[in-house]
Amino acid sequence: MPDSPTTSIAPAVNKRRDHYWLRLLATAAAFSLFGVGGLVLRFVLFPPLKLLYRDPAVRQRKARNIVQAGFRSFIGFMHVTGIYTYRMQGEEKLREPGRLVLANHPSLIDVVFLISRIPNANCIVKASLFRNPFMRGAVTTAGYIPNDDPEKIIAMAAESLARGESVVLFPEGTRTVPGRELRLQRGAAYMALRAGVTPTLVTIRCNPPMLMKNVPWYSIPKSRPHFEFEVTDGEQLIPLKDLQETPLAARKITHQLKVYFTEEHAA
Amino acid sequence: MFENREAIFIQLKDILVEMFEVEAEDVREDAHLSDDLDIDSIDAVDLIVRLKELTGKKIAPEEFKNVRTVGDVVTAIEKVVAE
C-alpha cells in the first residue's frame, strides 16, 4: 500500500499546510464524484444487472462487487489526490465470508474504506438514503438494510450472515463525537448473538480528524489526515460461547465492545 | 397480581430489575425508560413478550407505541388487564 504512515500524533498546527488548497479542491471533487458515481450506478451500471441476472441473490452479489470496486477506486482517488494517507492492518481478515464487522466511526468515509475491502458486504444504512436520488439505486440493488426498525435490522443482518455475507455496522449508530464517552447501541450485540457470529473488530483512527459529525465538507483539517485501520478477531475479547440471546447477554457484549473501543481509541 | 396500579408497578419493577439489571431504586413512575433506565426499543420487544406471558393477554405493540416512562407502561398494562 503506497503511503507514509505516521504513528505519532501530529503536532497541533495552525498554519495551513500539506497543500491545503489542493486538498480542498480534491475534497470538492471527491464529493461531486461520489454523487456522480451514485447516479452512474443507478442509471448506467445497475439497470443491465436486472436483465442479465434473474436471480435476485446473484444480482445483489454482482451489485455489491461493483460497489466494492467503485469504493476501492474512490478510496484510491482520495489517496492519490493527497486528501489523506492511510494504513490497514489485518485487512485479509475482512476478505473471509460471513464476518460481522464492527467499527468505531470517526469519519464520513469509514464505511467506504471498509466496504472497499469486504467482498459481498452488506451494511446497515440510514433509511433516508433509500429516498436519496444519488444513493437510492445503489443501496436498493445492493440489498443493504435500512436502519428504521431495530427488530427488522437484527433479523435481516442475522439472515445475511447465515447466508455467508459479511455485515458492516457501526455500533454507535452515528459518527463518534471526539472527547465524549462512547455510546453504543445494543443492535450489534443482538446480531452477534442471533447469528452466533463472533464480531470482527476494526479500530479506526483518523488524525487529525476529518469529515466528522456536524462539520461541513469544506472545513478540512489544516494538515493532511492519516487513517489507521486495525482489524482484530473478537474471539478472545468477546466470547459468545454458551450465551443465549437475552437482554442481559446483549448488555454484556455491548459493554465488552465499549471497553474495547474506548481502550483502543485511547491507545 | 395485576389488581391495581400499585401491584402492577411492583410487579413491573421486579421484571425490569430481573430482565435488564436496572437498580430497583431507579424504577419510579416518572423514570424515563431510555434516558434513565437505558431500556431501548429491542428491550421493549422482550418486555412485551414477557408481559404477554404474565397477563395471558394479547398485547399489540401499538399499545406500547407511545410509552416513554415506567408510569406509561403501568397505564398500558392496566388497560390490557381491564380488557
Image (cartoon, rainbow, N blue to C red):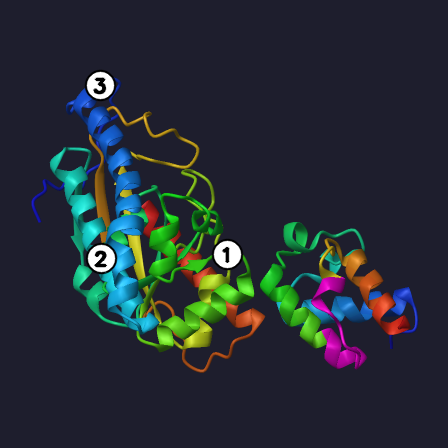
For label 3, the residue is A16
Instruction: Point out residue A175 in the picture as x, y percentages from the top left corner.
Output: 41, 44
Q: Amino acid type of disc 1? A: Gln
Q: Which chain is home to disc 2?
A: A
Quadrant in the rendering for residue B81: bottom right
* Residue drawn at the location 47% of the way across and 61% of the way down: A255
Instruction: State the extent of the magenta-drawn residues as a range.
Output: B51-63
Q: On residue A185, which mark appears? A: 1
Work out whether residue A209 or residue A158 is closer to the camera in this orientation and state it.
A158
> Would you say B17 lies left or right of A148 here?
right
Give the answer, above or below, for where A195 lies relative to A174: below
Task: Say which label, 2 or 3, has the lower sequence index.
Answer: 3
Query: Helix or strand or loop: what does disc 3 sit on?
Result: loop
Is mark 1 in CB contact (under 8 Å) with mark 3? no
**Residue B53 colored in magenta in the image:** yes
Q: Main secondary structure of the magenta part?
A: helix
The answer to whether marks 1 and 3 sit on the same chain is yes
